[in-house]
């Protein structure tokens, strides 16, 4: 028996190897989906959202229930993920060619990957700027998901980054809303004396630092240079503005946070709680967080926002605001593209958009007229006005460029905070990552 | 003839298990090896053969080497605590005369092992938290405030903080297994040694250590291969940060694939990880077989 066992095992392994090797190659080209076709109101529509947990969790659940009421033959498979877990889920589903019918996306390189890979249905015929549905969205948000004259994404909500502050803390410390970055740093001393942590900051996940950096890059580096540097093919990353921005960021961490070099050990949600609990005077946050930032301690009337102030003599564009819409793509390979379009039309109807924009969700819809002083909280309304007024939005650093470069910025931000690296060294490591990503 | 038929029929019973093991264990291994030779764009599905390109890149990747270094550190500390330390503790517990106390002590040490690694990681994340964590509070309350720091937020302390948590979690399990091995040693041997005037230390080194060497070998295998497969606690507590200082091979593999979209490179790391753990297991099994204790 023994002499035969080895050849049998070898044959089995050989067969397995051949089977494995034949699994390579490329996936089949996606069939051209007809987004404008009349939907067949039956079957199960699968949706991957970024709305898991409170307070956003029930939004899509309620939408699905309401849609099923109108179309009883349509069922839903709702996959709800968090901001962190949706990234892994999407990549796993993409690699295994099992994307749902509708799935969440950020803008920038993130959405580009799906469009370039033929996984996002061309929705130009139904959501192009001249279409009936397209006209219901703010043009900027629609354009954020457009490539080469074609529209692929459905923007659900707009987002922007602002410094949220407690008006009473500022009054107690005797400081005014800073007009320059230098004034912001100068305000930290009096705020600390008044008993507050000047700026609550938690960078355990790495991306909160990137949000500061991206806004400071926009202020310190000319826009054309920045855009070229986001693409490894054209990147040089030699503008002195980067080092200036990195130095400014380090100054802010050292002088305005209590955790200083230990900030990497703090969750962003802990920082959010420190602000909402009245312990910190400021917290740099997205519009999506505004309704969570207010509490018994920081009442909505006490909550104010301002754009991260521009450093003096900054050579970049001081009017650029960091932010970006977030939305959904429809799987180009889905057999239910038309039904998916119909559901997303329902999701972005003015009524549902108003619900999304109002507390407790507080996600400012990109649908024109959804965010008003009546439907949204005061801060959300103000934030959306400022986003709409901004001549240009700076997309999040971790989604605007390729992942290898974003990852180098992330590690660099952490190293800068902990004192493990200098601005020059951080820039050099990013340059290396960009070169290897070419 | 009948014997041959019986043997053939016997083999037929094994076929379903062989197929399952082949499909779910060996096929992914072979596929992983294949993926490690590819540059794979998961979005378009395009796969470009790059030969050993991913392995060449690995050799030049400083994070890969620091990850490997962290795994080695993890393994070294685990061997000290979870093999030798646990053996010593088990011997001490088994030396306690009261059986009730023995049981209580075993339970006390084992309880952390009953907690999942993810939960333990989260628990320690909050213990280490610089502002609200009880560790810094305790240090400040006892006049050691100067030692209070962001344990997981600094490159200098993050890895050792994770390893410390991991030892806390795994120590009791190893101790319990050693306790079982010590209980199997016939009491007459200890009795004879006591009559001969051999002290507690002498009994430990001359009787306990040699007679539990099979368990020691087994624990060394489990601890070493576990140290190279570590993932959960690092992911929960630091995700490899800050500045990649706590990356281990498992988390760097994950980051390369799922964050940096480089699945071929991740597969190359997985292959290296597989070779290391296979090598450790084969070597330890060989050593253990030679050291089997019979009585």
Image (cartoon, coloured by chain):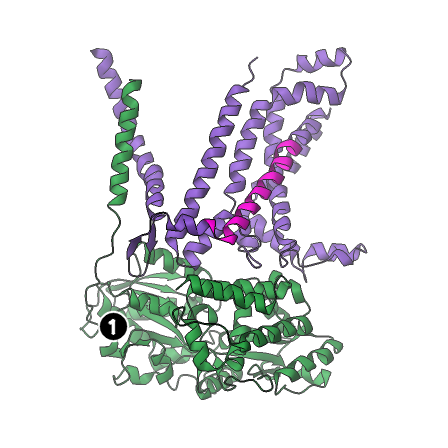
Chain colours: A green, B purple
| Quarter of the picture holding the C terminus of chain A | bottom left
Location of the N terminus of chain A by quadrant is top left
Residue B88 versus residue B198 in the image, above or below: below
- Left or right of B190 in this view: A121: left
Magenta-highlighted stretch: main secondary structure? helix
Is residue A42 placed above or below B291 in the rendered structure?
Answer: below
Residue range of the region highlighted in magenta in the rendering: B59-86
User: How many numbered tags mark residues here?
Assistant: 1
**Left or right position of A409 against A421:** left
Q: Characterize the local packing of mark 1: few (<14), some (14-19) or many (20 or more) Cα atoms within 10 angstroms.
A: many
Residue A293 in the image, given as x and y percentages of width and height = 57, 74
Q: Nearer the viewer, residue A285 or A340?
A: A285
Residue A106, how many percent across, how many down?
40, 70
The residue positioned farthest toward the right in the image shown? B143
- Foreground: A108 or A33? A108
Of the pair B50 and A18, the residue shown nearer to us: B50
Residue identifier under label 1: A122
Q: Is residue B285 visible?
A: yes
User: In the shown orientation, is residue A62 left or right of residue B291?
Assistant: left
């Amino acid at each position: 028996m023994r002499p035969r066992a080895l050849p049998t095992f070898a044959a089995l392994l050989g067969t397995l190897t051949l089977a494995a090797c034949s699994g390579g190659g490329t996936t089949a080209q996606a069939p051209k989906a007809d987004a404008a076709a009349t939907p067949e109101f039956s079957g199960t529509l699968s949706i991957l959202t970024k709305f898991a947990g409170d307070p956003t969790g029930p939004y899509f659940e309620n939408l699905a229930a309401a849609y099923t009421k109108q179309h009883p033959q349509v069922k839903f498979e709702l996959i709800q993920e968090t901001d962190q877990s949706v990234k892994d889920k999407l990549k796993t589903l993409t690699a295994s060619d099992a994307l749902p019918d509708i799935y969440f996306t950020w803008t920038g390189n993130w959405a580009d990957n799906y469009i370039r890979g033929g996984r996002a249905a061309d929705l130009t015929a139904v959501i192009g700027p001249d279409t009936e549905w397209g006209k219901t969205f703010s043009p900027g948000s629609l354009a954020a998901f457009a490539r080469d004259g074609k529209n692929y994404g459905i923007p659900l909500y707009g987002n922007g980054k602002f410094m949220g502050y407690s008006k009473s803390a500022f009054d107690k410390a005797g400081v005014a809303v800073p007009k320059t970055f230098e004034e912001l740093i100068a305000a930290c001393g009096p705020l600390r004396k008044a008993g507050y942590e000047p700026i609550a900051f938690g960078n355990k996940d790495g991306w909160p630092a990137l949000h500061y950096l991206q806004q400071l890059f926009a202020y310190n580096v000319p826009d054309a240079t920045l855009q070229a540097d986001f693409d490894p093919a054209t990147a040089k990353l030699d503008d002195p503005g980067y080092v200036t921005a990195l130095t400014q960021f380090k100054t802010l961490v050292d002088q305005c946070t209590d955790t200083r070099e230990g900030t990497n050990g703090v969750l962003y949600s802990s920082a959010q709680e420190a602000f909402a609990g009245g312990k910190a005077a400021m917290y740099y946050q997205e519009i999506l967080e505004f309704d969570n930032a207010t509490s018994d301690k920081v009442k909505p009337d006490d909550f104010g926002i301002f754009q991260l102030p521009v450093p003096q003599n900054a050579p970049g564009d001081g009017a650029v605001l960091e932010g970006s819409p977030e939305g959904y793509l429809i799987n180009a390979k889905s057999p239910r593209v038309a039904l998916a379009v119909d559901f997303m039309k329902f999701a972005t109807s003015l009524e549902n958009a108003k619900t999304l924009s109002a507390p407790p969700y507080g996600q400012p819809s990109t649908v024109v007229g959804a965010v008003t002083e009546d439907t949204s909280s005061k801060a959300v309304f103000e934030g959306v006005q400022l986003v709409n007024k901004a001549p240009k939005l700076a997309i999040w650093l971790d989604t605007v460029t390729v992942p290898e470069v974003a990852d180098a910025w992330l590690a660099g931000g952490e190293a800068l905070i902990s004192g493990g690296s200098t601005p020059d060294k951080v820039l050099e490591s990013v340059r290396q990552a960009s070169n290897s990503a070419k | 003839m009948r014997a041959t038929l019986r043997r053939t029929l016997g083999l037929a019973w094994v076929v379903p298990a062989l197929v399952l093991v082949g499909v779910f264990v060996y096929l992914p291994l072979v596929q992983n090896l294949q993926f490690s030779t590819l540059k794979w764009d998961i979005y378009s599905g395009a796969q470009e053969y790059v030969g050993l390109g991913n392995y060449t890149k690995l050799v030049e990747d400083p994070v890969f080497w620091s990850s490997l270094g962290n795994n080695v550190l993890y393994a070294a500390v685990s061997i000290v605590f979870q093999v030798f330390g646990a053996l010593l503790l088990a011997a001490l517990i088994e030396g306690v005369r009261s059986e009730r106390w023995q049981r209580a002590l075993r339970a006390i040490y084992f309880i952390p092992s009953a907690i999942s690694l993810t939960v333990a990681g989260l628990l320690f994340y909050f213990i280490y938290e610089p502002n609200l964590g009880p560790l810094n509070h305790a240090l400040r309350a006892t006049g050691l405030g100067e030692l209070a720091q962001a344990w997981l937020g600094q490159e200098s302390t993050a890895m050792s903080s994770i390893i410390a948590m991991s030892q806390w979690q795994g120590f009791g399990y190893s101790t319990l297994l050693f306790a079982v091995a010590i209980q199997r040693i016939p009491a007459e041997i200890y009795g004879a040694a006591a009559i001969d005037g051999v002290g507690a230390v002498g009994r430990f080194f001359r009787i306990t250590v040699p007679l539990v060497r099979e368990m020691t070998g087994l624990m060394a295998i489990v601890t070493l291969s576990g140290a190279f497969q570590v993932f959960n606690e690092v992911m929960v507590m630091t995700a490899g940060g800050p500045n990649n200082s706590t990356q281990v091979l498992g988390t760097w593999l994950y980051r390369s694939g799922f964050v940096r979209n480089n699945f071929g490179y991740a597969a190359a790391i997985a292959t290296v990880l597989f070779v290391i753990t296979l090598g450790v297991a084969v070597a330890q099994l060989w050593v253990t077989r030679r050291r089997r204790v019979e009585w």
